[in-house]
Image: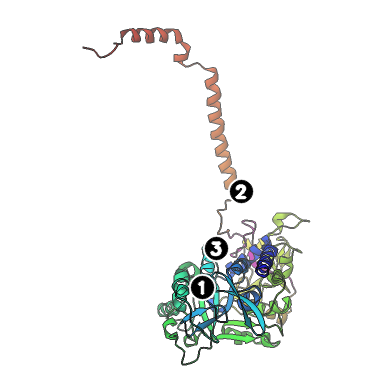
Amino acid sequence: MLFFCFAFLSVAADIVNWPQLSNQQLVAQRAQRDVSSNITIDQFGLMGVNLNTVLFDEFGYTSNVLLNVTTLLNVGVLVMEMDLYWNELSLVWQLCPLALDTFNVPLTANQVVRKDNRSITCEASFTFSLLMRTIRSFLDSTNTNLEVNMLQLLFNLKPLQNSTAYSAAYYNYYADPSLSLALNSSLKSSLFTPVDLEEYRQVNTSSNSGFPTWYQFTYYEFDRVIPIVRYNGLPTNSSYNITADFATVFFDKWSLDLSYSAYVTDTANKSISTLLAESFRFISDSDELKFTPNTFLDYIASGYSPIVNHTIQPLSDFALFINYSLWSWSEQELSGKSVVSGYDSDDDTDDYRCATFIESGWSVGLCDTAYQLACRNNNDPQSWSFSTDMYAYLDTKKNDYCPSGTKFSVPQSALEQQALHAAMASQNIAYPIWINLNALSAVDCWVTGGALASCPYQKVISSHDYLAMVTASCVVTFAILALIIGTRFYHVPVQGNRKHWKKIMTRMKEEEFEGVPS
């Protein structure tokens, strides 16, 4: 019993030690998300975690660990990989990698089982459905314009070794006999399924093998989750009817062009054209070859979704990867050396609301400084050129200043940013340059569209309109105040002739009848 108490306290301590995202990190994540809204969902590089290695094997397959799952989601982990085991005798899916005793041990109690010569803790009531309901709660709490995002779930399907029969009580309350049933019961309204993809491709005839953009996916389809079977290790004679899940979960038959690699040092050196031909690019590390924050960022910057698949102790050390999880903003912006929110402690706040492009990514710049402009080809998002002269960011209100056939722009994806770096090198353009991104209309709200673009998350009025509104309000207020003061010094007739009115009221009372007249 003491062992389980200490285990629980250990997990709780890790939860307490988890850092909250700083305002800089939140603003940076939102800015990158908004800029990428017109990129197709298969081209996103997202921060990922293998739940088995990072959480379950270390802290137990128990309901206590669900708090850490929620925390991972809150800090920006948008790819979650997990192993699911099919019990041939009980005909159920389970998260725990070994068979459990459901007859002699309470279903909500912890059991210690052996895996790979080590002890792990499992709880029979800790089910795949319970995990999906936790994700559902996260989706509900972030279903706002400011927080909405896309989540990718990767499943590795495996047969349970030494399957055993489970009790009727377990089967009645906790069993997951079907992947699609568990997913639909918790996430149905948020799932992007193979059926949805087929319907999208039928409507968009020019995109027979394409995917919707993030904006279409989120705001038109109202989807949030892409369920993908990354590995199917079930034997051909398995009792599980895998075809029943084809309408809900993506398998190889759907030709996602999914790329899943083990971490090797040369994978990030693929050409941009080769990477663009691949969809859903995942790469996973291991305890033998671990990501460092810098290599993690290298893969993010190359359009991959790196999945942390090594043991992390203490778990709060995962925070080291957060500042390296964005392909867009420079790590310096997230670590506090400079500030994404448009504020600099040594300079005027309002001047630092325009984005420059430096060697390490986006950086906040002084808006009235003169730099060259990044100009993207109108027909090829991977082709970049630059303004001939240097301009202050606010000069873009008057003119685009970009060469014909191009437009002042900002990289919308990691691969577009790689192409911009390459174009600067080939054309001998010096860093920094201006990119089309600013927070001029509202602090912490980074938008594209030039210096006159407004923040979509709040109503913005000009100082002239504001002055007119305040002036009108003040005039009305003073008029009302004058009327109130005037009534204090001027007696209305009733008050000024009280004796006359008192005589009239007395006479009226004398004429009133007592009781009911006959």
Residue at (57% x, 68% y) in the render: 63
Give me the disc on residue 225.
Answer: 1
Give the residue at mark 3. Answer: 142
Q: Nearer the viewer, residue 147 or 442?
A: 147
Q: Which mark is residue 155?
A: none
Between circles 2 and 1, the one closer to the viewer is 1
Q: Residues within 10 Å of mark 3 (few under 14, many from 20)?
A: some
- How packed mark 1 is, by other alpha carbons closer than 10 Å (few <14, some 14-19, many 20 or more), is many
Report the residue at 58% width, 78% height from top. Answer: 81
- How far is disc 3 from disc 2 in space, using C-alphas? 33 Å
Q: Secondary structure at mark 3?
A: loop
Q: Nearer the viewer, mark 3 or mark 2?
A: 3
Q: Secondary structure at mark 1?
A: strand
Q: Nearer the viewer, residue 429 or 214?
A: 214
- Which comes before the other along the chain, label 2 or label 1? 1
Left or right placement of residue 114 versus residue 162 in this view? right
The quadrant of the rendering that contains the C terminus is top left
Q: Position of residue 307 (x, y in %)?
A: 63, 79
**Which residue range is magenta in the image?**
431-454
Q: Amino acid at mark 2?
A: Ser
Residue 389 seen in render: no
The residue pinned by badge 2 equals 463
